[in-house]
Image: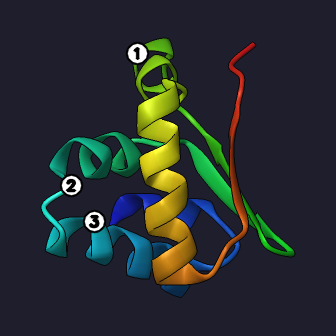
Amino acid sequence: MNASSKRGNDPERWESLLATLDEKLQLGLLEHLKRVISYHFEENILYIECGDLKDQGYLTKDPVLQQLKLLAEDSIKVESVKIKKIG
């Protein structure tokens, strides 16, 4: 089991998202998501807390966040992805 799977409220759903990214060769997104401090599914929203500013900066870029949202909508049926700000 991935280490980040232990840092959220729905490890199966999280692992499904990571597996989808791996299958679709979205390795940049995958590597950044493997390093998150925590994630939380609340209703149809995925909240992600990054471990450092570099990961946060990458995941909050508009094209990257849009891509992540589309992949998450398709693979784990969330309506939105929110990146929590550090500090």
Whether residue 5 can be seen here: no
**Which residue corresponds to mark 2?**
26
Residue at screen point 51% across, 68% down:
72
Identify the mark nearer the N-term, 3 or 2.
3
Location of the N terminus by quadrant is bottom left
Q: Which label belongs to residue 21?
A: 3
Q: Residues within 10 Å of mark 3 (few under 14, many from 20)?
A: many
Amino acid type shown at disc 2: Gln
Identify the mark nearer the N-term, 3 or 1.
3
Would you place residue 28 above or below residue 26 in this image?
Answer: above
Cβ–Cβ under 8 Å for marks 3 and 2 = yes
Would you place residue 27 above or below residue 65 in this image?
Answer: below
Q: Which label belongs to residue 72?
A: none
Of badges 3 and 1, the one in the foreground is 3
Residue 8, horizontal then vertical, whole percent = 64, 65
SS assignment at label 3: helix
Of badges 2 and 1, the one in the foreground is 2
In space, the residues marked 3 and 2 are separated at their CA atoms by: 5 Å
Amino acid type shown at disc 1: Lys
Q: Which label belongs to residue 54?
A: 1
Amino acid type shown at disc 3: Leu
Residue 49, horizontal then vertical, whole percent = 63, 39
Q: Residue furthest right?
A: 43
Identify the mark nearer the N-term, 2 or 1.
2
Residue 5, horizontal then vertical, whole percent = 47, 68
Residue 27, horizontal then vertical, whole percent = 17, 50
SS assignment at label 1: helix
